[in-house]
Image (spheres, grey):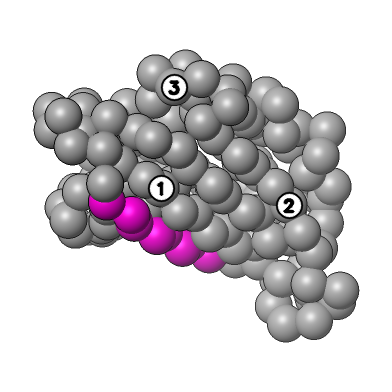
Amino acid sequence: MRIGMGYDVHRLVENRDLILGGVKIPFEKGLLGHSDADVLIHAIMDSLLGAAALGDIGKHFPDTDLKFKGASSLILLEEVYTIINKNFTIGNIDATIIAQKPKMSPHIDTMKKNICSILNIKENQLNIKATTEEGLGFTGACEGISSQSIALLVEK
């Protein structure tokens, strides 16, 4: 068994959609990034790649490559799954979204369905939770959103 961790953060800005877990969440700001800036999926991808000792998403999807500009992170997650599925199966993933606003709980079930369908795992193999930072730090000040993930892979 192999364990990997992932972390991602993006700044909240106006005139961008807020996409988390492949879900467009109604909010006055969205995350700034080269792709759709889905910090949840980015953290999950990094935890999977880390557990497989295959680098990080920057190595596989560099922000200097125009092919990934505005890309859906769901498509990038499919590519990561194809890479790791050659030698590993997913045991489980535990992820946390850190955001002061908006509330994530109404969207978590859809996020889980999106991610599980791409990773070919059951919903009891993926846990997504959300927390605020009680008004502290950049996430507490609504300047950005971050996410953390831990993944367990099992060698085939």
Contact, mark 3 vs mark 2 (Cβ under 8 Å) = no
Residue 71, horizontal then vertical, whole percent: 38, 36
Residue 78 to residue 67: above or below: above
Q: Residue at x 71, y 71 (%)?
A: 139
Report the side of 128 relative to 73 (left or right). right
Identify the image quadrant of residue 70: top left
The stretch of residues the image draws in magenta is 2-10
Q: Can you give x and y, in whole percent of width and height, for residue 115 in the image?
A: 50, 28
The C terminus lies in which quarter of the figure?
top left
Mark before the other along the chain sequence, 1 or 2:
2
Q: Which mark is residue 99?
A: none
The image's mark for residue 151 is 1
* Residue 46 forms part of the magenta stretch: no
Side of 37 where 23 appears, left or right: right
Dot 3: within a 10 Å radius of its alpha carbon, few (fewer than 14), some, or many (20 or more) residues? some
Labels 1 and 3: the sequence-earlier one: 3
Q: What kind of secondary structure does the magenta stretch mostly adopt?
A: strand
Q: Nearer the viewer, residue 143 or 92?
A: 92
**How many marks do you count on the picture?**
3
